[in-house]
Image (cartoon, grey):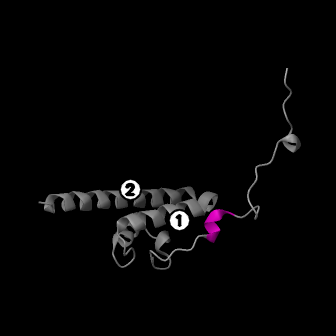
Amino acid sequence: MARRRSQAEKPQKARGQNPGRRWVAKVKTDSTHPEKGLFTKDASTIARSLASKKVSPKGPVSGMRMLTYFINRGGKGLSAARRRELERAKKLLRERMAKANTRQHRKAP
């Protein structure tokens, strides 16, 4: 019969060169330019802003990536209410992208 390992006996996962630091802290981006404090606003404002060409010159897909990145970077530090609002913003942004995509397909010959 195998015995259970204690916490001290369990093998530790290798975390890279900087233990305790997350990879997201190193990421630098210049593709989106959200205004300061945007992610503290309501879901519809966040979705509208991230879909705009001013904030996301490469389109709403870039804005979606920025929102997902922000949620991932927030991790356990985000309150449940804030996470719900950000997830709602993702849903609204996804709907905007789908609507724009159907308009684009109608224009095609």
**Residue 72 picture location, percent across and down:** 56, 59
> Does residue 38 show up magenta in the picture?
no
At label 2, which amino acid type do we have? Lys
Q: Residues within 10 Å of mark 2 (few under 14, many from 20)?
A: some
**Residue 52 picture location, percent across and down:** 33, 73
**Mark sitting on residue 41:** none
Determine which residue is flagged by label 1: 70
Per the image, label 2 sits on a secondary structure element best described as helix
**Residue 26 picture location, percent across and down:** 63, 70
In the rendered image, which quarter contains the N terminus? Answer: top right
Residue stretch rendered in magenta on the structure: 22-26
Inspect this view and state whether residue 66 appears: yes
What residue is shown at x 55% (from left), y 55% (from top)? Answer: 80
What residue is shown at x 45% (from left), y 78% (from top)? Answer: 33
Determine which residue is flagged by label 2: 91
**Residue nearest the observer in this picture, 49 or 33:** 33
**Residue nearest the observer in this picture, 11 or 89:** 11
At label 1, which amino acid type do we have? Phe
Decide: is 52 above or below 11. below
Decide: is 87 above or below 3. below
Residue 109 appears left or right of 70: left
Residue 54 appears left or right of 3: left
What residue is shown at x 19% (from left), y 58% (from top)? Answer: 105
**Residue nearest the observer in this picture, 40 or 72:** 72
Residue furthest front as drawn = 109
Q: Residues within 10 Å of mark 1 (few under 14, many from 20)?
A: some
